Image (cartoon, rainbow, N blue to C red):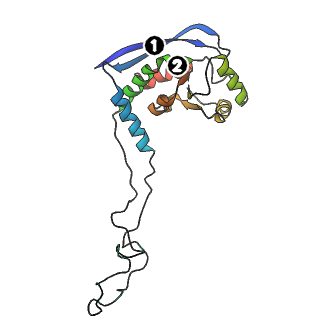
Amino acid sequence: MTVQKFIKYNSLDVDGQVLNDEHKLELNVLEKSGNYLIHKDILRHQISKKQGTVSTKTRSEVRGGGRKPWQQKGTGRARAGSNRSPLWKGGGVIFGPKPKKTILKLNKKERKLALQTLLYNKRNNISVIENLENAIDSPKTKTFFTMCQKCGVDVNQKVLVIVAKKTPALKLSIRNMKNVELISASNLNTLSILRAKQILLTPLAVNEIKETYCG
């Protein structure tokens, strides 16, 4: 059974000053622990990253082996039909891996519920920064680093920046920082949220999360 929870945030400007506006995020979370759903969604996300391209050749795919090595009877040796038998050096592989695609299915409602549950669990680590998408005009890592210091964000820990749309300047400014991940609200996933110690949101991203995942 799901329960509605409300989270309220006062946004900060790029200088770290608290603004008077209030942003409310309405989340549907399970009445009991929803950790099993989060685990299931993270497992689905990790499995989807598998390439599944590993491959071995069977005895029919290995080059050669067309001629019978020796006659069937009379030599005193064990009978052999091909020098590409799996028992021979240079032969095929028995029950070796073949290319395959592994998919773990999760219902859309379950995925949305897992995401909302995780956002609610991380509610104390979320900050809303006003106009973050357009705050950086030219791509400079120092500008973003200074802004994080003013807003009380520790870049030595994993930081997730969620924006409505990635701007080239912001993308290039963050690219050089190993602990900071930039993601658009439409591509939000549980694995990125789980890894993050601090989450930075923008008002536009909050609205997109409401429309996409909380509907």
Residue labelled with disc 2: 126
Pointers 1 and 2 in contact (C-beta within 8 Å): yes
- Residue drawn where x is 61% and y is 8% of the image: 19
In-front residue for pair 190/169: 190
Which residue, as the protein is rendered here, is positioned at the far front?
76
Q: Secondary structure at mark 1?
A: strand
The quadrant where residue 116 appears: top left
Mark pair 1, 2: CA separation? 10 Å
On the image, the x and y values in percent for residue 77 come to 30, 87
Looking at the image, tell me whether mark 1 or mark 2 is earlier in sequence order.
1
- Where is residue 151 shown, x and y percent of the image? 63, 17
Q: Secondary structure at mark 2?
A: strand
Q: Position of residue 1 (x, y in %)?
A: 28, 20
In the depicted structure, whether residue 210 falls above or below residue 179: above
Q: Which residue is mark 1?
A: 7
Vertical arrangement, residue 87 with respect to residue 132, above or below? below
In depth, the one of 82 and 26 nearer the eye is: 82
Residue 35, image x, y percentages: 36, 27
Q: Amino acid at mark 2?
A: Ile
Q: Is residue 103 left or right of residue 202?
A: left
Mark 1: which amino acid? Ile
Q: Is residue 125 above or below residue 101?
A: above
Residue that appears at 62% across and 26% down: 155
Count neighbours of disc 2 (C-alpha within 10 A) and say few if under 14, some if 14 to 19, many if 20 or more: some
Question: From this viewpoint, which residue is outermost toward the left?
Answer: 73
Q: Nearer the viewer, residue 215 or 48?
A: 48
